[in-house]
Image (cartoon, grey):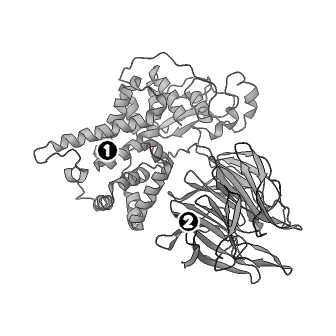
């Protein structure tokens, strides 16, 4: 996304002032939310936002690192807010102190006629200052943890922790009120249009165009096309004039924020990559234009790549990552038996090597990592010609390639119980007892440092073959089956309060799938649902901060009973079963998934009728 900023700025500095509207559209909500967090006044925040963008445009030539526009506009906004606070502190009835808070300076807006604003201010004032800003950027700016981290120059982990802690300090009613109040006070439609009209009257000296490298990312490629560097895509200026000529086929306006873009329909034009676009450097970009920056919001994203197979084909295995390596542990191969096999995968070399076997042969186990040690928990094996649930816990040290026995889990269970680690503790959740076919809701907490277990609050829904993923100090139990139905239920567990909360359902009910956490999102991959045809390739992304699900690019293979782990910013889906109609066929398949960094753009309620509703006639 920063590379995209670079090309927009290049256009602005070479005479295309209307291109600045795309930077305004991209950052206006973030800047507005930042200003509000400093001033606690919506009217003043809008004034500051307008002034910040005008200052940025007037001084655009002074920005040396064009891909750091986001940090630059943050600094400009922060300085304007400081000046406003300092100016108000000099009023006769106010004693100025350099580090006075907004509250002590009494510059918050009057809320005598709006009790919601009073409640909002009380809610924010009840929190430490470090939490107020991230909450405002999230709820008013519409930013997720990763975006806030980039905007403020902090680590995503720090932001997610602050958001999680801030939300835990407020009652749900307060959070709902905050979200509703911020929604009612967002920037009005037409803000971008107003800024673009103002910058047209500002003259900045052009610069010598910089050479643009052709080794471009997907987002950069579409930026170039949209900014008319190519000949087939064009920006419509506010007066309605059209430049360029469309390719044969359908042409239409996509409403991006307040900035309509004339694009061709490209879902079926991959043949252009070796024809019209040959020699332009955009050949590899065109086939995927429908997922690019200025296309309509997509419900699918990311890319899959085939990687080296594991040596031992198996299903119902467990995988965990330690220090950039993935360890595939245990599993089952029908008609062969249970495995104690441990294989180590290095994503950098795309190679697998054998490690020391786990002491106990088993499948349907789960693994968790604490302090760079892997804990293999529960599962099942065959004894006396029947499946037997296990309570065994064994610790693996990858650094020394050694296993040791630990305290047994109190409740033996298998068939995909699930476990997650939070704050140095492991939570073993749900599962099924093989001989009795009892489905559990039981939750047991394991402390590796003390090697002890204790009982915690049961999960609300009895289930097995589900996934539990830890994120922001919470655990999300997702999907599975209760023996009668495939479930889409999502329940959030807070280990601190020992309480469960119902969240938005997963779109596709299923069991025997895999899950992985990456960049503050949870990805559910593959699985099984007989009514949907058996083995699945579906990938769905869950954003806990927004409590929303998004459809992502399908996994190339249809699999259930697989496992997934994250290493080096990628998700690896490993092993599983791909036989249809209830048959079994363990596989050694490994596929790598990159969710990508692109962001769907939501234009709801942001288009002025005088500009955003313009219809583009075909250019004859």
Q: Is residue 583 magenta?
A: no
The vertical placement of 151 against 122, above or below, is: above
Q: Is residue 97 visible?
A: yes
Which segment is the magenta one? Answer: 599-607
Q: Residues within 10 Å of mark 2 (few under 14, many from 20)?
A: many
Outermost residue to the top: 208
The vertical placement of 123 against 301, above or below, is: below
Outermost residue to the left: 92
- Return the x and y of residue 559 as percentages of the image width and height: 77, 58
Please tell me in which quadrant of the rendered image residue 455 appears.
bottom right
Decide which of 597, 342 is in the foreground and name it: 342
Assign a secondary structure to mark 2. Answer: strand
Q: Mark on residue 475?
A: 2
Residue 323 left/right relative to 336: left
* Structural distance between the alpha carbons of marks 2 and 1: 36 Å
- Return the x and y of residue 366 as percentages of the image width and height: 68, 66
Point 53% across, 32% down: residue: 4
Point 40% across, 67% down: residue: 173
């Amino acid at each position: 996304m920063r590379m995209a900023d670079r090309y927009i700025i290049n256009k602005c500095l070479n005479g295309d002032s209307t291109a600045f509207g795309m930077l305004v559209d991209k950052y206006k909500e973030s800047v507005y939310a930042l200003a509000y967090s400093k001033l606690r006044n919506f009217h003043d925040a809008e004034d500051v936002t307008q002034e910040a963008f005008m200052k940025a445009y007037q001084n655009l030539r002074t920005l040396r690192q064009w891909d750091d526009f986001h940090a630059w506009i943050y600094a400009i906004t922060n300085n304007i807010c400081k000046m406003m606070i300092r100016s108000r502190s000099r009023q006769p009835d106010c004693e100025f102190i350099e580090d006075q808070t907004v509250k002590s300076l009494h510059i918050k807006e009057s809320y005598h006629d709006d009790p919601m604003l009073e409640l909002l201010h009380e809610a924010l004032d009840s929190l430490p200052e470090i939490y107020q800003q991230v909450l405002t950027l999230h709820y008013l700016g519409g930013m997720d943890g990763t975006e806030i981290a980039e905007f403020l120059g902090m680590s995503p982990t720090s932001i997610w922790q602050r958001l999680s802690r801030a939300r835990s300090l407020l009652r749900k009613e307060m959070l709902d009120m905050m979200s509703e109040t911020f929604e009612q006070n967002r920037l009005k439609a037409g803000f971008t249009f107003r800024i673009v009209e103002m910058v047209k009257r500002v003259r900045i000296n052009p610069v010598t165009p910089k050479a643009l490298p052709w080794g471009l990312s997907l987002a950069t490629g579409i930026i170039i096309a949209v900014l008319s560097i190519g000949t087939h895509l064009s920006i419509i200026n506010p007066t309605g004039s059209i430049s360029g000529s469309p390719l044969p086929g359908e042409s239409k306006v996509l409403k991006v924020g307040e900035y309509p873009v004339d694009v061709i329909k490209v879902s079926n034009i991959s043949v252009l990559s070796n024809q019209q676009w040959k020699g332009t450097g955009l050949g590899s970009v065109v086939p995927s234009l429908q997922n690019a920056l200025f296309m309509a919001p997509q419900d699918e994203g990311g890319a899959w790549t085939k990687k080296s197979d594991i040596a031992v084909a198996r299903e119902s295995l467990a995988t965990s990552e330690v220090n950039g390596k993935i360890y595939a542990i245990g599993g089952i191969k029908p008609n062969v038996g249970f495995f104690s096999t441990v294989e180590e995968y290095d994503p950098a070399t795309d190679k697998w090597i054998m490690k020391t076997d786990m002491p106990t042969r088993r499948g349907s186990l789960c693994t968790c990592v604490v302090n760079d040690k892997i804990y293999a928990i529960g599962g099942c094996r065959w004894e006396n010609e029947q499946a037997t649930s296990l309570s065994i816990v064994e610790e693996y040290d990858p650094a020394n390639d050694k296993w040791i026995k630990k305290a047994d889990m109190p409740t033996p269970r298998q068939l995909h119980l699930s476990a997650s680690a939070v704050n140095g503790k492991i939570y073993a959740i749900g599962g099924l007892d093989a001989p009795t076919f009892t489905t559990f809701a039981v939750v047991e907490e394991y402390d590796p440092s003390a090697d002890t277990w204790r009982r915690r609050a049961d999960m609300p829904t009895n289930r097995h073959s589900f996934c539990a993923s830890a994120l922001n100090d919470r655990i999300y139990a997702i999907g599975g089956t209760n023996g009668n139905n495939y479930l889409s239920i999502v329940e959030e567990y807070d280990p601190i309060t020992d309480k469960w909360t119902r969240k938005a359902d997963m779109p596709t009910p299923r069991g025997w799938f895999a899950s992985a956490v990456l960049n503050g999102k949870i990805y559910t991959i593959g699985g099984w649902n007989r009514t949907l045809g058996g083995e699945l390739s579906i990938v769905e992304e869950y954003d806990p901060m927004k409590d929303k699900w998004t459809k992502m690019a399908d996994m190339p293979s249809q699999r259930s009973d697989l496992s997934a782990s994250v290493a080096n910013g990628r998700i690896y889906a490993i092993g599983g079963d791909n036989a249809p109609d209830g048959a079994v066929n363990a596989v050694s398949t490994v596929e790598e998934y990159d969710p990508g960094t692109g962001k769907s753009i939501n234009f709801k309620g942001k288009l002025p009728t005088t500009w955003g509703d313009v219809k583009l006639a075909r250019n004859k």
